[in-house]
Amino acid sequence: MNDYFTAINHFLETILFFDILFESVEGVKIPFLVAWLIVGGVYFTLITRFINLRAFKHAFDIVRGKYRTKDDKGQISPFGALSTALSATVGLGNIAGVALAVSIGGPGATFWMIVAGFLGMSLKFSEVTLSLQYREFLKDGSVMGGAMEYLSKGLASKGYTTLGKYLAIFFAVLMIGGAIGGGNIFQVSQAYSVLSHEIPYFDANPLVFGFLLAGFAGLVIIGGVTRIASITEKLVPVMVLIYIAASLWILGNFYEKIDDAFFLIFSEAFNSNALYGGTIGAMVQGFQRAVFSSEAGLGSSPVAHAPVKTKYPVRQGFVALYEPFIDTVVICTMTALVIIITGVYQADGPYTALIAAKEGAALTSVAYGTIISWFPIVLSVSIALFAFSTMIAWAYYGERAWVYLFGSKYSIIYKLLYLALAVIATTVKTAILVDFSFMLMLTMALPNIFGLFILSGDIQMQLKEYLCKLKSGELDAEALR
């Protein structure tokens, strides 16, 4: 079985990461997936005329409920959908991934990570808008949305019925695999690895930890998206505030070094320093980390936004702009600044063993722990919360894909399987399966962005119509007071 997963994993890596375009003087090349996401991000930023900047204030007004109407249809609030999507993205990528990106690509990787987050805002706006446009209200009261719907229905409306059908099925299979491995097993194993060091009882009784985490997750996901949203609305702000507060505390104590850190970030973003692979190496590390962090372009979070209560699809697209901004531009940048200021990323420093072993979470823990002695304990709790929130969000993503393929009456099978694997993840080695599932998650970007390109005209049309109504005052007139 391991040989089977390894073979498929190698095949997917060949497709996603074969080197194209050009090679830097240090021998670093741009992987296809990075180029694919860059092209997609730039294209949708341009055709929406920098909507990632123009709609920032209007998005906030939507989140706070200013534009609710009597014609809104859905199950959860715009903020609930945003929280659910953020619960899937704010997590180990912000803690472990950023440290690895900086240690491998140098401080310049931070610049490209910010650029990727900026471009990712436009991708997120586009895919969420289409998710709402082509969503379907099922007989059981739930909502089916996401890439499966706009790939099948959207492409059919353009005359590509068969292509859209097969791309949607392909995407759904990928998302189920990604949910089970990356959204579930990986999260549980990482949380157990950290907490078992802090709580010896769990180290001796891994199944107890597995059953506890699966039990709490089960109480949430069995209730569907409304319960998931109600939990994430409370959990995500707390997680984010704890982590940002610790970051600001450190940055505040070393405010005189922030200018130097930003100078390193910008100067090494365009540096040919062979130590870190130069500009191309920094760019690759920054964009890859941003993908894992915000999931912009993968087509996963549009599933979380599909059940939102709204009248206009593009309206929730505006709200979704905040995801890459909060997750990548704000939180990841703060983490990177702490990593750079404390110097733990340096290849010739005392933490080369952690860098070589790619222990990103441990490297971040060391960075914060050098300033806040008790932070490793806080980090352990944060990782557990991040893992739990990611679990419940990806459980919903995978369940919607399962329902798309097999129907609503079989969704309980998926949920029970998901929870059972959460327990098993604490007792078996899962490295190969997790690597395989991450490849599946990344592969989701291929059909998703391809579909976005074909449906880009729908996005432009909806955006133009909505902004005309906003400018004329029609949207203010229909809003509930």
Image (spheres, helix red, strand yellow):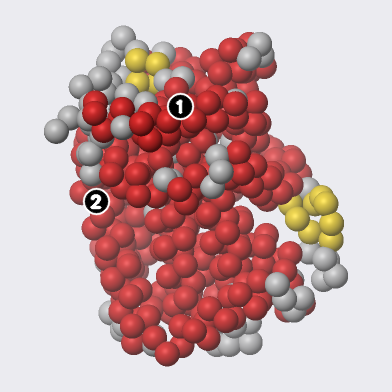
Residue designated by label 1: 465
Q: Nearer the viewer, residue 244 or 27?
A: 244
Does residue 312 appear in the picture of this structure?
A: yes
Q: Are marks 2 and 1 in contact (CB under 8 Å)?
A: no
Q: Quadrant of residue 379?
A: bottom left
Q: Quadrant of residue 204?
A: bottom left
Quarter of the image with the N terminus is top right
Q: In this image, 349 relative to 75: left or right?
A: right
Residue at 71 percent across and 49 percent down: it is 35
Q: Nearer the viewer, residue 118 or 189?
A: 118
Does residue 169 appear in the picture of this structure?
A: no
Q: Position of residue 431 (x, y in %)?
A: 55, 51
Q: 10 Å neighbourhood of mark 2: few (<14), some, or many (≥20)?
A: some
Q: In this image, 361 relative to 17: left or right?
A: left
Say which amino acid is labelled 1.
Glu
Q: Position of residue 120 (x, y in %)?
A: 54, 48
Q: Residue 366 carries which label?
A: none
- Identify the mark nearer the N-term, 2 or 1: 2
Q: Up-down: is 255 above or below 288? A: below
Q: How many labels does the image show?
A: 2
Residue designated by label 2: 235
Label 2 and label 1: CA atoms lie apart by 36 Å
Element under label 2?
Answer: helix
Quarter of the image with the C terminus is top left
